Image (spheres, rainbow, N blue to C red):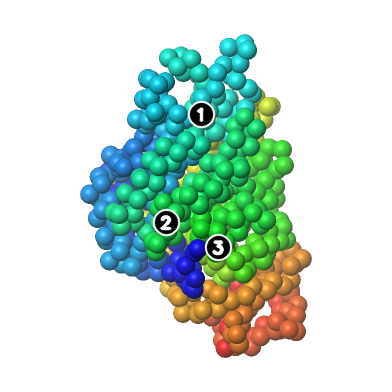
Amino acid sequence: MATTGPRWWQEATGYQIYPRSFMDSNGDGVGDIPGIISRLDHLRDLGIGFVWLSPVYASPMADNGYDIADYQAIAPEFGTLADFDRLVAEARARGIGIVMDLVVNHTSSAHRWFRTACADPAAPEHAFYIWRDPGPDGGPPDDQRACFGGPAWTFVPGVGKYYFHFFSAHQPDLDWRNPALRAEVYRMMNWWFDRGIAGFRMDVISLIGKDVDARIYEEGPRLHPYLQEMHRETLSGRDVVTVGESWSVSTGTARLYCGRDRGELDMVFQFAHVMAGWDPVHGKWKPRPFDLVTLKRVMTDWQAALAEDGWNSLFLSNHDLPRQVSKYGCDGAHRVRSAKALATVLHLMKGTPFVYQGEEIGMTNARFTRLDQFRDVETLGQYADQAAAGVDEATFIAGANANGRDNARTPMQWTAGPQAGFTTGTPWIEVNPNHATINVAADRADPDGVFAHYRGLIAARKAHRVIVHGRYTPFAEDHPQVMAYARTLGATRLSVIANLSGQDAQVDVPEGLAISGRCLVANCAPRAEARGPLVLAPWEAVAILSD
């Protein structure tokens, strides 16, 4: 049974670091662990409670570290195990926990397990992976496709069989039906816990229960027994945080992962609000226009679903998603104000908020113009499939610029200087040219900058229990411009109202939710009252507290 009462991660704010793009300490153009250590004071000043660190394990980097060759070694381009231990210690000294990325749906094809599996079909490691005989024509056993493009099966001549890979051929899927494989995973997890990490973010964890033959990938029949076993073997009794990533979890299944009596995870990353903006046929490569009413409906549904049991993770950005100010806000004249408005409505909801690196200064999408500027294996793989389906290059690039993963992976913009202060060398992916004006040094120097607003929101969360534990009540749900809700805890009420558009907006505050008090958060002129017809300036956001 999960620990009862408030947990530290419910009151904390998370921050995701994509190591390759955060800070380079040695001039090789790739971010690294010593670089992260050099910027920990930035996170302390922001008020961050824990860092979700995207993979730093040894890897050929076919998928930028999500193809792991050794779960207990650090990739040389990122540093050493001693560097990692120093990161954990230095972060802890600043009140920050380090949460590792657990990638156990698949390994790299360079992992020792897979190399052994290919070299000796009689070896125990061979059964760690999913193998099938060729089809009647000698080709793949069936027509399943990999989500990074191409067939989901790759032939190994020395074995005479095909292995399954949900992602790329460099990422063979592990067969979680094998208890010996599961035991190896749990041993590895405990090894990291013994080094002092604060938890795991679990990559595509909803895939581990898959039934390939039935073509059931997400939330397969064995998923929750595996997660319960994982909890018993690694998590039980530890004061850590676990977040499971799932592209299939719904409001109906979420509590199976994170209900208080389930003995599985603490929360899930769900993407219903993201996928609501995708085309039903072409997915994210042909995005729909932003629809605030739809976004609000999805987020309200999730607030309701986990109101009494389970816990929400709150995010609009991560390493797989476009920059939120470009996707949901205005990355032009109203960039700063819209960045603050989006942060306000997100951070004051019920759940644990996550900040993706650069979000706290309002970084924007990159807008590449050529295919050779992209680095993401998914984008490049999908281009081949989309082109074969008749999508022209210009249309594909437009879709990738709107929703592709490289938007979030351009280097962190620290200064206006060469390469944004990220590296003294040539960065592995181009720096966004707008670093000359959008950078940490400039934003932090501005007392009314985006960083200051984020810091204020994070501090408010620590100071006011209503933000962490208060009941969520939405209003103006059908308003096409305004997002508004109240949070209540006992006699305390917080009203949050934001115009998420570039035009003035009028909203009627229901009498029962009208409030007078003190302005806790504002990105325009402070307001102490919300009642009657309220006229909001473009991208204006305000939160009013009444005790």
The secondary element bearing badge 2 is classed as: helix
Q: Secondary structure at mark 1?
A: loop
For mark 2, what is the residue? 235
In the rendered view, does 203 fall on the left or right side of 272? left
Question: What is the C-alpha distance between the residues marked 3 and 2?
Answer: 14 Å
One can see residue 414 in this view: yes
Separation of marks 2 and 1 at Cα, in angstroms: 27 Å
Reply above or below: 410 against 177. below
Outermost left residue? 82
- The quadrant holding residue 146 is top right
Q: Earlier in the sequence, mark 3 or mark 2?
A: 2
Residue 187 figure quarter: top left
Residue under pointer 3: 261
Amino acid of disc 2: Leu
Which residue is painted at 62% across and 64% down in the image? 306
Residue at figure coordinates x 41%, y 37% from the top left = 180
Residue 86, given in percent of the width and then of the height, sits at 24, 55
Which residue, given by chain and number where applicable, does mark 1 sit on? Answer: 130
Mark 2 is surrounded, within 10 Å at the Cα level, by few (under 14), some (14 to 19) or many (20 or more) other residues, namely many
Alpha carbon separation for disc pair 3 and 1? 32 Å
Residue sitting nearer the eye, 207 or 525: 207
Residue closest to the eye, 272 or 455: 272
Nearer the observer, 152 or 386: 152
Which three-letter amino acid code belongs to the residue tagged 3?
Asp
**Residue occupying image coordinates x 62% and y 47%:** 248
Q: Position of residue 174 (x, y in %)?
A: 47, 35
Comparing marks 3 and 1, which lies closer to the viewer? 3
x, y (%) of residue 475? 72, 73
